[in-house]
Image (spheres, grey):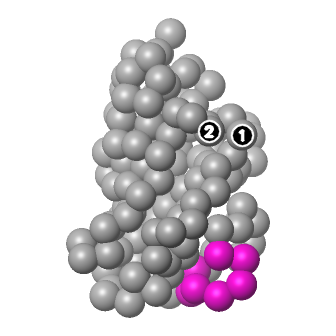
Amino acid sequence: QVQLVESGGGLVQAGGALRLSCAASIRTFSTCDVAWFRQAPGKERAFVAAISWSGQTTNYANSVKGRFTISRDNAKNTVYLQMNSLKPEDTAAYYCAAKSKGASIVTSARALYDSWGQGTQVTVSS
């Protein structure tokens, strides 16, 4: 498993932007596919975006397409989530997750990710 630490959350007004970071503890992070999930109070944890180990393939939930961008810098063992045009419904705890590269590289299936961070809170005010 990989130790993951998220940062960058906070309070922002609707229409604003935030950039989340997910830093990993090991150099082999570059061989991991990584995803962001989010969980609002009373709701299940939901897929947001994923990026392959190489950074060449990405996948987004329909609700964030065109507004969020996932990227990675393997030299820094870090994955980013740039969130623009934020809406109140984006309010949630955001979690970074990782899995070893292989099949289903940018899967939205939560169960396939075996390493998780502690989360960072994003609150969007109207």
Q: Where is residue 78 in the image (x, y as percent from the top left)?
A: 32, 67
* Residue 97 visible in the picture: no
Residue at screen point 74% across, 72% down: 111
Residue at screen point 36% across, 35% down: 18
Query: Given the current orientation, which residue lies at the most extreme left position?
Result: 76
Classify mark 1: helix, strand or loop.
loop
Name above or below for residue 18 compared with residue 86: below
Q: Which of 10 and 36 is in front in this view?
A: 36
Residue at screen point 38% across, 89% down: 28
Provide the residue designation for mark 2.
65
What is the three-letter code of the residue carrying label 1? Answer: Asn
Q: In this view, does 53 lie to the left or right of 41?
A: left
Whether tag 1 and tag 2 are in contact, CB under 8 A, the answer is: yes
Quarter assignment of residue 82: top left
Provide the residue designation for mark 1.
62
**1 is within the stretch colored magenta:** no
Q: Position of residue 120 (x, y in %)?
A: 42, 48
How many marks can you see? Answer: 2
What is the three-letter code of the residue carrying label 2? Answer: Lys
Q: Position of residue 49 (x, y in %)?
A: 59, 53
* Residue 28 visible in the picture: yes
Q: In this view, does 102 lie to the left or right of 67?
A: right
Q: Give the range drawn in magenta.
A: 97-105
Q: Is residue 21 left or right of residue 84?
A: left
